[in-house]
Image (tube, rainbow, N blue to C red):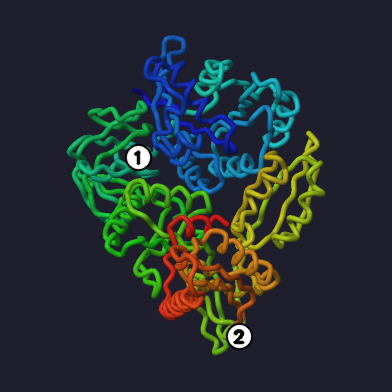
Amino acid sequence: MAFEHIRNFSIIAHIDHGKSTLADRMLEVTHTVERRLMREQVLDSMDLERERGITIKMSPVRMEFSKEGVTYALNLIDTPGHIDFSYEVSRALKAVEGALLLVDATQGVQAQTLTTLSMAQEQGLTIIPVISKVDSPLANLDEVTMEIVDILSCDPSDVLRVSGKTGQGVRELIEAIIERIPPPTLTPKSDSLRALVFDYTYSNHRGIIVHTRIFSGTVREKDRLRFVEAGEEFLTNGVGIFVPKEKQLPELQAGQIGYIVTGIKKPGIVSVGDTLTLSRNPEPALPGYRAPKPVVWASVFPESQDDLHVLRQALEKLRLSDSSLSYEEESSGTLGRGFRCGFLGMLHLEIVTERLKRESNIDIIVTTPSITYEVTYNDGRVETIYSPSLFPDHGTTKMVREPWVEVHLITPEEYINSLMPLLYEHEASIQNSKTLRDGRVSLHLSMPLRELMRGFFDVVKSTTSGYGSLSYDIGEMRPTDVVRLDVLVAEELVPAFSRVISERVVDTEARKTVEKLKELLPRQLFVTKIQARAKGRIIASETLSALRKDVTGYLYGGDVTRKKKLLEKQKRGKKKMLAKAKVNIPHEVFLKMVKN
């Protein structure tokens, strides 16, 4: 197909604004998927995506549409909407010329909408504004249209209206994509291969399969290719497109989006952002994009040390399909050997740990999530701390610095008063605010990343009855007053429960932690102390009473001294047991404590 008949585009929007549903209707209108095979969320192939109703991993698909006797190839990359996966969006935007900015007619422009829009504008993409869910009785079309006009400085007639549920306006949208989004631009050396890797998956039989956008040249089966950055060469074992399942083709040409089977089965070679070129005629790398930086860290341990190798294999396999996951091996005196993992956010952590459990079929222990701290010791040494259990003792540091974030929060005006105590509790300061056209308020905040990860997103949603939305960017490192809070069970330290928290709330958090653990922990055969320790002293304590077996139940009548002897014997046994006591904490307790 001629490159002037190709259109490469992505859909960007806030979470739950109808991206996947609109993609379903586009697949129907273009007859890409037969009606008998249609289902909801066609492009969401993972079970977790379908269960949660969200897109976790980007999915490319090629559709064909005829207009005025000409057949056009429409390459769509469906992207996630949740803030944790904005990295996926940034990768997709490098591979396309245009983007549909999708806005929910019932909710209007949201914080994440503006974040993804700015990414697309930085890439110089053509933006097509689209209002979704226009069939809803709660749709506020005129106000939402004017909001979009304000942020894009476009004409109201440029804003398209569609319904992913009924299919209204979808055909007109496809025609607008053909008219407004430009075809791919060929580089001067159009005969020399340069292809950008924007994603990859792994197959046990075929190795790593890279998802790529061909910027120039042609790639065929049996071509010898090279990764420019990695320097690795391989023989192509197949090329093709997604419709949405893989469809093998003889070749991929300039302007197309598709896949290349590499046959590589070693981890650490393929990286997102690398460039593919012909070994016999190499070209320099295309401008890539920055590697994702983890913002949340947590340790993952197998419940049984016999499963360490299985867990390692599961992480390696997951890393082959999730390039934003990072990990390294570590050991703990209490939990044994495991892995310190870096995540893009709390949802990313939840998704990865859930996939590990499902795909490896083993029980795992996940420690309390933390962020990175930069510690300056009294002797002048500077160290980066990733794990709360390794955070230095109170009094040994001269200064501790932590990352701050710039948060954009949009909320209906009536919830502002309820949000103020919440912002104070999470150490957030308002930098500026403005009232939007529809009466909602846009707040720009600065706050510690530590507090953002302490359930801030969830409490904002709860306080604003689900109408609040936020996005954030990592800012600078700032000095902070934080301490390590340790938890002891039966006078034994449990590293998985250690946390780094603000010195201001350490007493409150200590009490909440021991009370919650007392509720969750099953009773033992001996009295169990649950203690919280910070700044070198115990600051909160609870006692879990022992399970008491009635050792005198079978006695009746007779001398009371016999009962007393049995009770004394039981008492001595419990005292002896307490001296060598070790509490086995169930896996479910760890998970519930991590979720706070």
Give the residue drawn at x 35%, y 70%: 336
Residue 284 point in image, percent of width and height: 34, 51
Quarter of the image holding residue 570? bottom left
Q: Which residue is mark 2?
A: 395
Residue 137 point in image, percent of width and height: 70, 20
Q: Which residue is mark 1?
A: 211
Front label number (1 vs 2): 2
Residue 518 point in image, percent of width and height: 57, 63
**Callout 2: SS:** loop
Q: Please say whether residue 127 is visible from this viewpoint.
A: yes
Q: Amino acid at mark 1?
A: His
Quarter of the image with the C terminus is bottom right
Q: Which callout, 1 or 2, points at the residue further toward the start of the chain?
A: 1
Give the residue drawn at x 40%, y 72%: 334
> 54 and 291: which one is in front?
54
Q: Amino acid at mark 2?
A: Gly
